[in-house]
Amino acid sequence: MNRETLTRIIGDLTEGLTPELTAEDFPCFSAEATEGNEHVSPDYLDVIARSLDKSDIATFERAAKAMDDGDLAWIGFKIVYDPEAAMSNTDNEVTKKYGDEGSADGEPLVFFCNDAKECVASRPYSPRDFFQMKDVTRGPSMHNEQFEGLTWASVPLFDSVRVWLLGASDASSEVAALAHHVGFDVTVVDYDPAYVNESRFPDAHRIVLPGFDELDKIKADDSDYVCVLTRGHMFDPEGCVWALANNVHYVGMMGCAGKNERVYELVREAGMTDADWERVKRPIGLKFGAKTPAELAISIVAELVDVRYRQRYSEEARAKHEASLGRS
């Protein structure tokens, strides 16, 4: 989400104008995101835009403040395709009971929701609406299509975590696809354009360097994650040194114990300490017997998701979440 987009929408609504809403600004309405869903399409953004008025300014102002504060928060959308069904749907024997009221009305709605379950909207919403509005904090909603007549979508108001893939190996290509799918911003780095191409990495930023000895020409942030996946492990030492020198939040490396010992020696020769080396997760990924590039990618991305979860949520919040799922 672009902060200037919110400012523009607030300005248009203040002037009594219908703001322009685009799928570029709200990618949950893109052709890719809505493909195969006959209940919603990119054109629905025009319906939402026409529904907005000055009463919605507070929603967008709260979203702008959340961006300024760096909160985990979302702009959400109620999408109505059958107003009568949306208002009259009922719980079944499985769902938690939210009363006899369906959705509060049969009109589209833009709302704000953050991870603290604060919701801001221009109109009253029903208990069942609130249940689904809160669920956008899983972004996108886990239960967005639970009830008939309406569905829900959301756009995060915070940046995606950037994952650097050092090396354009087959495993790296598989990791790039999965990591993008679960919301990471992926950048792949290698020296051979035959491997760093759109076909292998269609959803990643691609950087081609003359060699891994020139990694110092690019910089990572301390909030970034790094996966060292060079082809044949030949440049893993350079990748580890670069990640540690940039003090990234997470760095992991593939490889067996024997190979890792030699990488350790080379990393130490490059000036890194034993404490630095201990920051490298090795081997990268969760342990469940993965062997093929695709299986390794599942293992690696699962670990990235877990690292992101622990980074964003306190121990207390995680314990509460696990308890709600019946896990000790």
Image: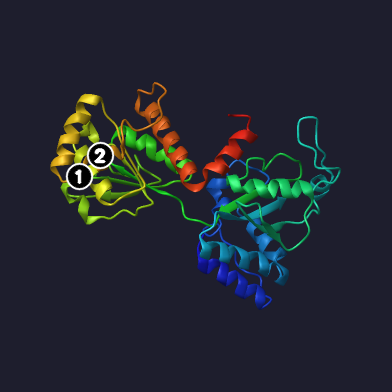
Query: From what the image shows, is residue 237 above or below residue 296?
Result: below
Q: Amino acid at mark 2?
A: Trp
Q: Quadrant of residue 263?
A: top left
Q: Is residue 92 left or right of residue 178?
A: right
Residue 262: image location, x then y, percent: 16, 31
Instruction: Please indicate, yes or no, whether residue 82 appears anywhere in the rendered image.
Output: no
Q: Is residue 219 visible?
A: yes
Which is nearer the N-term, disc 2 or disc 1? 1
Instruction: Check disc 1 and report the residue beneath it.
Output: 272
Task: Name above or below for residue 192 compared with residue 51.
Answer: above
Q: Amino acid at mark 1?
A: Met
Q: Residue at x 18, y 51 (%)?
A: 214
Q: Quadrant of residue 36?
A: top right
Could you tell me which secondary element the residue under label 2 belongs to?
helix
- Image mark for residue 277: 2
Residue pushed farthest right? 100
Percent across and percent down for residue 78 are 70, 52
Q: Are marks 2 and 1 in contact (CB under 8 Å)?
A: yes
Q: Residue furthest bottom?
A: 15
Observer-nearest of 322 and 130: 322
Q: Residue 89 versus residue 70: which sits nearer the camera?
A: 70
Residue farthest to the left, as pictured: 269
Quadrant the C terminus occupies = top right
